Amino acid sequence: MSSSARLSPRDSVFTTLAWNGGSKIADIKKHMDRLHEHAQRLRINLPETTEIEIRRILKTLKLDDVDELIPKKMIRISYTPNNSEPIKIESRDMSLRNFIGEAITKQAPYWSKSATGCKHGDWAPYIEAIDNARITGADFTLLIRDFKIIDAGQATPVVLDVDGVAYFPKPSDGAVRSITLDSIIEQIREQGIPIKEGNLNERMVARAREMIIVGTGVGVCKIESIDGVEFLEPSDKLFEIAKNALKQHYANPNTWTDMEAES
């Protein structure tokens, strides 16, 4: 994609949520809070009626009667101020969910300080990162800045170090805060793995026992190699704990909001 075809980060703001295919969306309050936070950072005035409009549009996408508390699809909610229909909802299938796969690395894109770490209009480099993995036969792309992994093309990376502590990238380094990881972080701690922000630099990753990525679309996936290099003493501990924690999270009725109920 040429630079002239790319949008500005300030042209749009979005979030991606898990949807059961019927009237229920997971973690919508957290997603709406982040959407408002990112819009504010991007100087986009998000209308107060945004959630009402989301409820209206979702009714037109609804599949046959679906009651299960299971993520069936993803929906991408975006707001683009200068469009004739500024609020847009798109649904798509989930792929590579709870998968064990390979990753490649790629330099992370640079934006302004206020735009970096937001889900914004110039998302093409992240889409290209996902395509890069596909073209090479890998499954995921890890994004590198200043010799640190700061993000993945479609999820948040988490490393289990040899000291038994799990680390995820710092938003101050350019990472997008993960709603999915936030939702299971306490369960991971309760299972005996301390987890906190850290620098996923070359030294840490080289000695790590395990790496996973966590996100709405992928669930919890394990990375078994990076640029063809496998982990020296691989573990499944973090993968299994995080995977089970997310399964329990989605099984909890409190995770889901019925968008057809009275607000």
Image: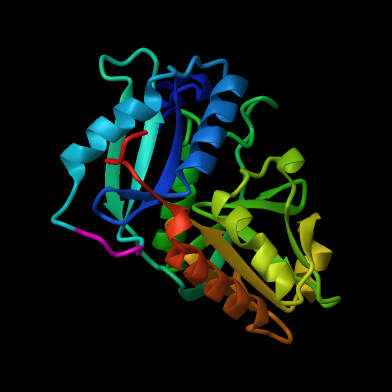
Q: Quadrant of residue 58?
A: top left
Quadrant hosting residue 41: top right
Quadrant in the picture for the C terminus = top left
Q: Position of residue 178 (x, y in %)?
A: 59, 49
Residue 56 horizontal/vertical position (percent) = 24, 31
The magenta stretch is 66-70
**Is 96 located above or below residue 126 in the figure?**
below
Q: Is residue 206 visible?
A: yes
Q: What secondary structure is the stretch in magenta mostly built from?
A: loop
Tell me if residue 35 is in the magenta stretch. Answer: no
Please state which of residues 129 and 189 is positioned toward the viewer in this rendering: 189
Position in image of residue 183 (x %, y %):
58, 56
Q: How is the image coloured?
A: rainbow
Q: Is residue 58 positioned above or below 4 on the image?
A: below
Question: Looking at the rendering, which quadrant does residue 228 occupy?
Answer: bottom right
Q: Left or right of 129: which side holds 204?
A: right
- Residue most toward the right? 163
Q: Quadrant of the N terminus?
A: top left
Pick the front one: 133 or 66? 66
Q: Residue furthest toward the front?
A: 262
Q: Is residue 11 left or right of residue 33?
A: left
**Vertical relation: 127 (above or below) 45:** below
Q: Residue at x 49, y 44 (%)?
A: 126
**Closest to the observer, 218 or 17:** 17
Image x and y of residue 73, in percent: 31, 56
The structure residue drawn at horizontal position 45% and vertical position 46%, both measured from the top left corner, is 128
User: Position of 205 compared to 1: left or right?
Assistant: right
In this picture, is 176 found above or below 186? Answer: above
